[in-house]
Image (cartoon, helix red, strand yellow):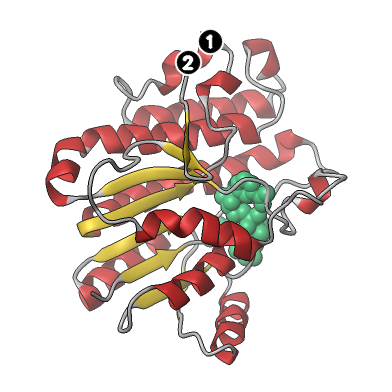
Amino acid sequence: MSKIALVTGANQGLGYAMVARLCQDLPAGSAVYLAARDPARGEAAVATLRAQGLEPSLARLDVTDDASVEALAETVARQHGGIDIVISNAAARMVKDRPQAAQVRTFIDTNNHGTYRMIRAFGPLLRDGGQLLVVASAFGSLRNLDPRLHHHFDPATRSLEDIERVMDEYVALVERGEAEAQHWPSWINVPSKIAQVASMKVYARQRQDEAARRGLLIAALCPGLVDTDASRPWFDDMSAAQSPEEAAKNVLWICTQPAEPPLPYGELVQHRRLISWL
Ligand SMILES: NC(=O)c1ccc[n+]([C@@H]2O[C@H](COP(=O)([O-])OP(=O)(O)OC[C@H]3O[C@@H](n4cnc5c(N)ncnc54)[C@H](OP(=O)(O)O)[C@@H]3O)[C@@H](O)[C@H]2O)c1
């Protein structure tokens, strides 16, 4: 049966490779949306894939903009009546030559509030058997966080909005240079990935009964190290990194699983294994 799929931040890197893979792997008649915030970069990416015989559709989407996310969700609902695969992949990059305090606001707005916007707008559109997947990382485990901060991210008791608030407070702490004194990790990517996974877990808990009935999958994915313009500046040795194409194949295994238990529902998955939360 044909599917409707959407990948955010898909004009380059892992997102682009996932769109290519979905175009190849989904049944005939499927629609795969390559979402990009910049129309020219999005059009160029779509044109490159079309030259290879693939047929993605371009979607304009800035995940930091409520109106942009809501408008695309309305378009998908109007045109298709729902969606089968939503991959929240977009991420802001960090650069080495600027202090983290100068980058944290955009970073959290894109990676965390952007994930929240995607969950809120696209979660309700999931069709039976649908999948909402958040691209996170292996950093997104509470094992990487001081136990004194664990309560902020407890999926059993927190709401999505609680996590949004905590991340806004975190941004303010980093901007004031006070985060490390309050036990937060020194690299902003770590709390960000933990919060992304926590939000996915909270949402998975909220929809658990319905998901079991309807075969929905809500999960987070860690691709492992991928050779992209985002990761390259941070590692001296990229010899062990996967190409985006290899990583896309690896993470999208989850989209071709039969929609039957046991599914990695509410879990963070890397290389087909679950990464423990605690
Ligand atoms: N690469 C790795 O080794 C690695 C490891 C673990 C996890 N991950 C995760 O994998 C995902 C993809 O990483 P990547 O390496 O492919 O990154 P990337 O090459 O920097 O690609 C990120 C994509 O997100 C888009 N984006 C940025 N801000 C956006 C916004 N406001 N709205 C919509 N799109 C936006 C970028 O668009 P522009 O081109 O317009 O900037 C780009 O298309 C991220 O979630 C990352 O954390 C990556």
Q: Is residue 239 left or right of residue 206?
A: right
Q: Is residue 203 above or below residue 177?
A: below
* Residue furthest top in the image: 148
- The picture quadrant where one finds residue 33 is bottom left
- Quadrant location of ligand 1? bottom right
Q: Is residue 47 left or right of residue 273?
A: right
Dots 1 and 2: beta carbons under 8 Å?
Answer: yes
Q: Residue at x 20, y 36 (%)?
A: 208
**Is disc 2 surrounded by few (<14), some (14 to 19) or many (20+) residues within 10 Å?**
some
Residue 62 image position (x, y, % from top left)? 50, 62
**Is disc 1 surrounded by few (<14), some (14 to 19) or many (20+) residues within 10 Å?**
few
Tell me the element at label 1: helix
Q: Is residue 106 left or right of residue 234?
A: left
Indicate the amino acid at tag 1: Pro
Marking on residue 150: 2
Indicate the amino acid at tag 2: His
- Please say whether residue 65 is visible from this viewpoint: no
What residue sits right under mark 1 in the picture? Answer: 147
Residue 23 image position (x, y, % from top left)? 45, 76
- The picture quadrant where one finds residue 227 is bottom right
Q: Is residue 35 above or below residue 277?
A: below
Q: Residue at x 59, y 57 (%)?
A: 247
Residue 229 image position (x, y, % from top left)? 75, 59
* Viewer-proximal residue among 65 and 273: 273
